[in-house]
Amino acid sequence: MKQTILYAYFALLIAVGLPFLANLGGRESAERPRETNPTPAAAVEEASPPSPSSLPAAEDKSLPPAAETLRVLMEDGTIRTMDMQDYLRGVVAAEMPASFHPEALRAQAVAARTYALYCASFSKHGEAQVCTDYRCCQAWQRDEKLKDRWGEAFDANEQTISAAVGGTYGEYLAAGGRPAFAAFHSSSAGATENSADVWSAVPYLVSVSSPETERDVPNYVSTVRCSPIDFRDTVLSAHPEADFSGPEDTWIGALRHDGSGRVASVVLGGTELGGTELRSLFSLRSTAFTLERTDEGFVFTVTGFGHGVGMSQYGADKMARLGADYREILAHYYPGTLLVEGPSSTA
């Protein structure tokens, strides 16, 4: 009887725990860069690549090949069985500008395939394995929308994206004998975030350097300004226990940073709020921010965009322009993972 109860407990833990981790990451894993060339030629040589190491190929022959098809929950609620390559073309086109370096696009293709396989490894959407909502899984766009977006550049861009997806046919990242949780984000403020400071600890989602700067990323530094009343009421909406009865210059208390330099917590009105919660409350682009009181009110100055975990898309593009190939990019942002080779590569 005790053994039966123990088995049931472990089954419940697996059923609840894996989807929970995926949902945490999926909400922002697909924050997309703007459709623009992020790296002016004059800025390319100003930084050195972060000395990436080579990504080892997986030696475990028991690792399965990537699935050829995927059951996708569409925006209209229907479930569509798609060829994996076709699905990935729509994902990479939605997630990364076609103007990015080909090696960055290849890194994105592998990360997107890995993330899809990770979601498919459990029932995240019932009969469907992944959805097209970037707030949950990954963004995806059909050709009709891409034609509207790209206009006359559609054919050239489509060929570029197809080359990145085809050139990494069947390749994905593995860790612990299964597809890795390949979270990614738009841009980092000098370093990526440790997953333990956002969700829970994942061995290969740790803080690493990221080379993009404000010369490479549109809106790399942004500001959010609040009047004293709006600032106070926003905090009180989530923490009614906070005390703002004193002078405004006493409202901001101790600010604590985590290992990546992002804000871990801030004391406001005598109450400690986490950096991630503040990002949500004030719609900040990331938790890499400063907060100060000015004559007009309170000002957040924010660097980068996204949760910061895993591969930085602008960082990948900068690394590629500095000479790194997609294997080196993936090895840098997902240290400790193994690259499972596809059966062949086709352009």
Image: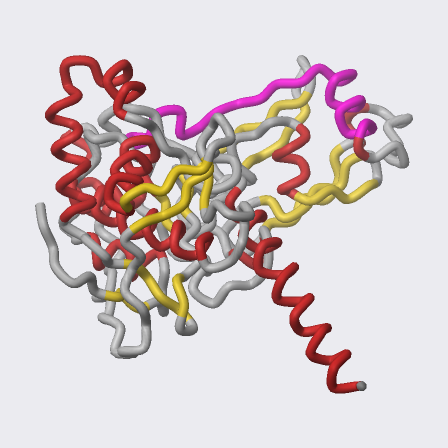
Is 329 situated left or right of 222 in this image? left
Range covered by the magenta-colored residues? 214-237
Tell me if residue 221 is in the magenta stretch.
yes
Q: Residue at x 80, y 86 (%)?
A: 1
- In the rendered image, residue 196, in percent from the top left (x then y), is placed at 57, 59
- Report which quarter residue 305 is drawn in: top left
Is residue 44 at least partly visible in the picture? no
- In the rendered image, residue 295, in percent from the top left (x then y), is placed at 68, 15
Is 36 situated left or right of 133 in this image? left
Can you say whether 60 is above or below 167 in the image? below
Q: Residue at x 63, y 48 (%)?
A: 264
Tell me if residue 228 is in the magenta stretch.
yes
Nearest to the observer: residue 73 or residue 180:
73
Is 304 situated left or right of 295 in this image? left
| Number of marks | 0
Is residue 20 at least partly visible in the picture? yes
- Report which quarter residue 318 is drawn in: top left
Nearest to the observer: residue 107 or residue 82:
82
- In the rendered image, residue 291, in percent from the top left (x then y), is placed at 62, 32
Can you say whether 169 is above or below 151 in the image? below
Nearest to the observer: residue 74 or residue 243:
74
- Report which quarter residue 338 is drawn in: bottom left
Q: In this view, which residue lies farthest toward the left?
A: 347
Q: Residue at x 61, y 18 (%)?
A: 225
Can you say whether 223 is above or below 267 in the image? above
Q: Specify how the rendered protein is coloured.
A: secondary structure
- In the rendered image, residue 167, in percent from the top left (x then y), is placed at 14, 49
Q: Residue at x 47, y 28 (%)?
A: 75
Nearest to the observer: residue 274 or residue 165:
165
Looking at the rendering, in which quadrant would you find the C terminus?
Answer: top left
